[in-house]
Image: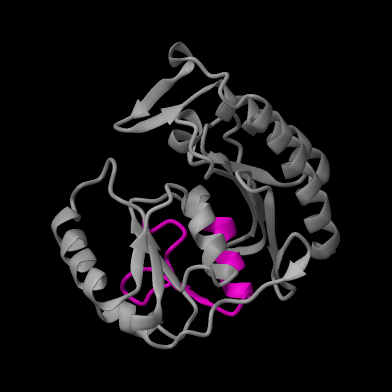
Amino acid sequence: MNLAELAKALEETCSKTGEFILAQKNRVASKDVEVKSLNSLVSFVDKQAEEQLVESLQKLLPEAGFIAEEGTVVEQADVYNWIIDPLDGTTNFLHGIPVYAISVALMEKDNIVLGVVYELGQKEMFTAWKGGGAYLNGDRIHTSKNAKLGDCLLATGFPYHDFSGKESFLKLLGRLFENTRGVRRLGSAATDLAYVACGRFDGFFEYGLNAWDVAAGALLVQEAGGEVSDYSKNSDYLFGGEILATNKKIHLELQQE
């Protein structure tokens, strides 16, 4: 498998689906919005975007299965599986806030080998493949070089359905407010991770996430020179529900927070 060639084809697929999503901007009525679970919204845009992605990806790699947020296809395969979030940041999209992204990753057995995050607000295509580096609109990107937490800008996501860790999360935020250059909350984990990969953020952390939120973005960070784990120094960030992604230089210090 030529991952570089597959990456180009995946970029084209995400670009076409992105055109559809952007064409629907400001066209979704309240009656078109469903509530999947507490504060988790979905519209026909998410579902149709996922259907488009699945149709194209089936042609790119017929032997691959799918792990997709909206469940338009539920067939998984033994070796290759696409992990898809057709619209990461649905709430932003529905409220007219221009931070939302398509996130698609290819998993080979237990390893992510290819990932694209297409941030639609600024039309930025982030791409990475195993051993090939990370790119933004075709240009190589790297994580930041900041080694002191006091020089760092971090990103996170606020709990919106799982409030079990709320108290410890708020205490951590309090410490970070006092000891960093700030903490941002964009509302799209895929975008947050892409921004870590290109050095805009020095680190990102969040709990209550799913594999489709982080799969592509995590590979971007790793291929850009960063480090990804869960909060406890383990590698189960994909299905474990929590993630810490940094420029590597501040990883241990953030884990200790």
Quarter-of-image position of residue 141: bottom right
In which quarter of the view is residue 74 placed?
top right
The residue sitting at 64% across, 74% down in the picture is 223
Residue 49 % position (x, y): 64, 31
Q: Considering depth in this image, is 27 or 215 the residue closer to the camera? A: 27
Instruction: State the image coordinates of residue 84 (x, y, percent, origin top left).
Output: 59, 44
Is 132 left or right of 163, judged from the image as shown? right
- Does residue 244 appear in this view? no
Residue 8 located left or right of residue 113: right
User: Residue at (54%, 41%) from the top-left corner?
Assistant: 98
Q: Which residues are magenta?
A: 215-242
Residue 50 spot, x, y in % from top left: 63, 33
* Residue shown at 48% from the left, 35% from the top: 90
Chosen colour scheme:
one colour
Left or right: 46 as drawn, with respect to 205:
right
Closest to the observer: 48 or 194?
Answer: 194
How many numbered callouts? Answer: 0
**Residue 138 visible (yes or no):** yes
**In the image, residue 173 above or below residue 52:** below
The quadrant of the picture occupied by the C terminus is bottom left
Vertical side of 24 occupied by 162: above or below? below
- On whether residue 240 falls in the magenta region, the answer is yes
Residue 233 lies, in percent from the top left, at 36, 77
Instruction: Point out the image quarter for the N terminus.
Output: bottom right
Q: Which is more toward the observer, 246 or 211?
A: 246
* 111 on left or right of 231: right
